[in-house]
Image (tube, helix red, strand yellow):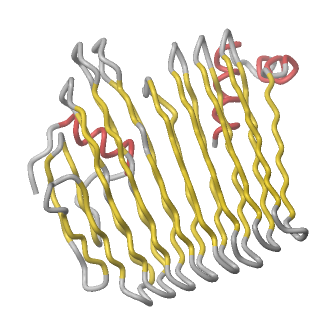
């Protein structure tokens, strides 16, 4: 494993909770190079020949194992596109921790576009955690454009935790999913923008099999003059159930656009969308201020609790 400097270590801690080499299978990517890689008896990580991604294969029946695939970038002006494919065998049950941290201290934009494709066999289960983080004093932007494709076979399930709380100037997240009979998808997105940052989340989930279900919930805060767009479409092609929810706090001169789309192509498709956008209630702030907090501290407490 390559030696990482203090900035790279901090980024790894932010996006993957890593303070040392993780147990299990892992691939750490730093400034477009491999900083370390390990497979296990049940999980094989295979680098692409062009160096632009990985193929991860998980054997059927694998339980209680993890895969860590974080990316860190510290060079201003660096741009890359990475393709990672995950093949999850029948009845496997694993955790995959991804994410990208960019520290840009220079004048040029730095960008990481990660394309992840998940193929889950019958009965497989995956918890997927993806965190994005930006830092650095440079004038160059920190840009992250994740693309995710999910293919769930019969009775498989995937839980996705998507987090972006600090420092990312521009992001365009695109997620598509195809669900077979009895498959289940759960998405929990947490997002905060500030300054003049922009963030767009696009979801298209097709419920193709009887008993398939999807639950997409986004919680976000837009500060200063930042802009957010949440665009979620559920397509019910069978007797299925689907729910999307956008719950947002708007502050200062921020802007938020929620775009619901429900398409029912079966009489037994039950689809629901909820959306709420508003400012922090004044009585909440006053209540906390009576406990000794300043107005700013009260706002921070409310936001932290909302995004937890």
Q: Quadrant of the C terminus?
A: top right
- Comparing 47 with 61, the one in front is 47
- Comparing 236 with 91, the one in front is 236
Q: Quadrant of the N terminus?
A: bottom left
Residue 255 in the figure: left or right of residue 285 = left
Please tell me whether residue 234 is drawn above or below residue 240 in the rendered image: above
Q: Position of residue 182 (x, y in %)?
A: 70, 79
Occupied quadrant, residue 225: top right
Please tell me whether residue 185 is drawn above or below residue 278 in the rendered image: below
Occupied quadrant, residue 221: top right
Q: Residue furthest front?
A: 265
Which residue is located at x 59 percent, y 78 percent? 156
Q: Position of residue 216 (x, y in %)?
A: 69, 53
Which residue is located at x 75 percent, y 50 percent? 244
Occupied quadrant, residue 107: top left
Q: Residue furthest left?
A: 2
- Comparing 290 with 105, the one in front is 105
Number of marks drawn: 0
Q: Position of residue 45 (x, y in %)?
A: 24, 70
Q: Residue furthest right?
A: 267
Residue 249 in the figure: left or right of residue 187 = right
Q: Residue furthest bottom?
A: 61
- Comparing 214 with 2, the one in front is 214
Please tell me whether residue 89 is drawn above or below residue 299 in the rendered image: below
Q: Position of residue 307 (x, y in %)?
A: 64, 38
Which residue is located at x 63 percent, y 55 percent? 187
Which residue is located at x 26 percent, y 62 percent? 54
């Amino acid at each position: 494993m390559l030696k990482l400097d203090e900035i790279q270590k901090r980024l790894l801690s932010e996006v993957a909770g890593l303070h040392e080499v993780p147990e299990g299978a892992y691939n750490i990517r730093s400034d477009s190079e491999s900083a370390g890689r390990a497979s296990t008896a049940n999980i094989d990580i295979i680098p692409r020949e062009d160096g632009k991604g990985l193929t991860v294969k998980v054997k059927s029946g694998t339980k209680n194992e993890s895969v860590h695939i974080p990316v860190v970038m510290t060079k201003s002006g660096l741009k890359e596109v990475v393709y990672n494919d995950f093949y999850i065998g029948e009845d496997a049950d694993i955790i995959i921790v991804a994410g990208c941290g960019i520290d840009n201290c220079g004048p040029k934009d730095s960008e990481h576009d990660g394309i992840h494709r998940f193929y889950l066999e019958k009965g497989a289960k995956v918890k997927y955690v993806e965190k994005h983080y930006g830092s650095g004093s440079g004038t160059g932007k920190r840009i992250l454009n994740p693309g995710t494709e999910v293919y769930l076979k019969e009775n498989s399930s995937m839980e996705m935790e998507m987090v972006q709380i600090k420092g990312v100037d521009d992001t365009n997240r695109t997620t598509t999913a195809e669900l077979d009979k009895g498959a289940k998808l759960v998405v929990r997105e947490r997002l905060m923008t500030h300054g003049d940052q922009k963030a767009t989340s696009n979801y298209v989930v097709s419920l193709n099999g009887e008993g398939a279900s999807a639950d997409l919930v986004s919680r976000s805060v837009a500060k200063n003059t930042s802009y957010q767009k949440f665009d979620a479409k559920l397509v019910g092609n069978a007797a299925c159930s689907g729910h999307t929810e956008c719950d947002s706090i708007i502050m200062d001169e921020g802007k938020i656009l929620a775009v619901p789309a429900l398409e029912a192509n079966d009489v037994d498709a039950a689809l629901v969308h909820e959306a709420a956008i508003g400012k922090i209630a004044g009585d909440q702030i006053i209540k906390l201020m009576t406990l000794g907090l300043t107005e700013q501290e009260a706002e921070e407490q409310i936001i932290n609790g909302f995004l937890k």
